[in-house]
Image (cartoon, rainbow, N blue to C red):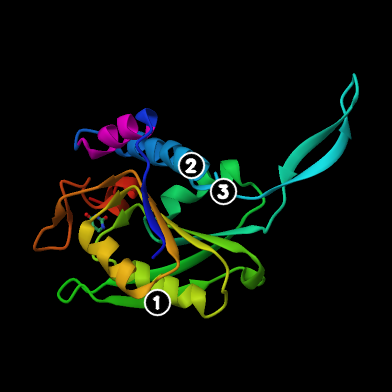
Amino acid sequence: MKDVMVLNHPLIQHKLTLLRNKETEVKDFREIVEELSILMAYEATRDIPLKDILIETPIARTTGKIIAGPKIAIVAILRAGLGMVDGILRLLPSAEVGHIGIYRDPETFKPFSYYAKLPQDIAKRDVIIADPMLATGGTAVATIDYVRRFSRTNIKFICLVAAPEGIKMIRKHCKDITIYTATIDEGLNEHAYIVPGLGDAGDRLFGTK
Ligand code: URA
């Protein structure tokens, strides 16, 4: 793994606290995840390369900067990653979106894959993998491994809450990934939930509990 970037912008930290609060209702939770995803994507795209182009303003000719590429693919880990896609797309509207369906066995916490669909030209795109919670890291590593079967490009992993266990797992298995998170929490409980975390991100996003 290349780096872990903890994004401590005040707006990110404020919105994270709203998300953590168990009193936050599903509608607000969903909106805040989207807002946080915009802010996280803004920070995570600081290093994308620019190129110069010549343009004319109403006053004069000048050189402006535009994004040079490569194009980007967002890969959402189902189901909670879906909550982050629209926010990231607000900043990167021409990104293509892939989906990976992986669930954790409730007893062993091992990842099982049941669905995968990636953009056809993923090999030419930098990849942003989105999942609000980096817990054991099993799902994250399985997703990174799957994407790596089709692409050797730059991969960034964006989450909202990371556990040290998940970071360690990615660090061990995936040498060339940068993780962007709003926080590194204390650790996992016996059910592999992040403490203090924010609960089950999928349930809170979709109101299924
Ligand atoms: N997935 C979640 O949604 N929450 C956790 O705390 C851990 C994994």
Which numbered dot is residue 47?
3
What's the residue type where badge 1 is placed?
A: Tyr
Which numbered dot is residue 114?
1
Q: Is residue 131 above or below residue 120?
A: above
**Can you give x and y, in whole percent of width and height, for residue 21 in the image?**
21, 35
Neighbour class for label 2 at 10 Å: few (<14), some, many (≥20)?
some
Quadrant in which the N terminus appears: bottom left
Give the left or right position of residue 188, taking residue 44 as reference: left
Q: Does the Cβ of the disc 2 residue fall within 8 Å of ligand 1? A: no
Residue in the picture at 33% in, 38% down: 29
Give the left or right position of residue 122, taking residue 88 as reference: right
Neighbour class for label 3 at 10 Å: few (<14), some, many (≥20)?
few
**Can you give x and y, in whole percent of width and height, for residue 85 in the image?**
50, 50
Q: Quadrant of residue 64?
A: top right
Residue that badge 2 annotates: 43
Q: Nearer the viewer, residue 72 or 106?
A: 72
Asked whether residue 28 is drawn in magenta, I would say no
**Can you give x and y, in whole percent of width and height, for residue 105 in the image?**
22, 74
Q: Which residues are magenta?
A: 12-21
What's the residue type where badge 2 is placed?
A: Glu
Per the image, label 2 sits on a secondary structure element best described as helix
Q: CA distance from mark 1 to mark 2?
A: 31 Å
Please identify the residue farthest to the bottom as the structure is shown.
Answer: 149
**Can you give x and y, in whole percent of width and height, for residue 149 in the image?**
52, 80
Asked whether residue 19 is drawn in magenta, I would say yes
Mark 3 or 1, closer to the camera: 3
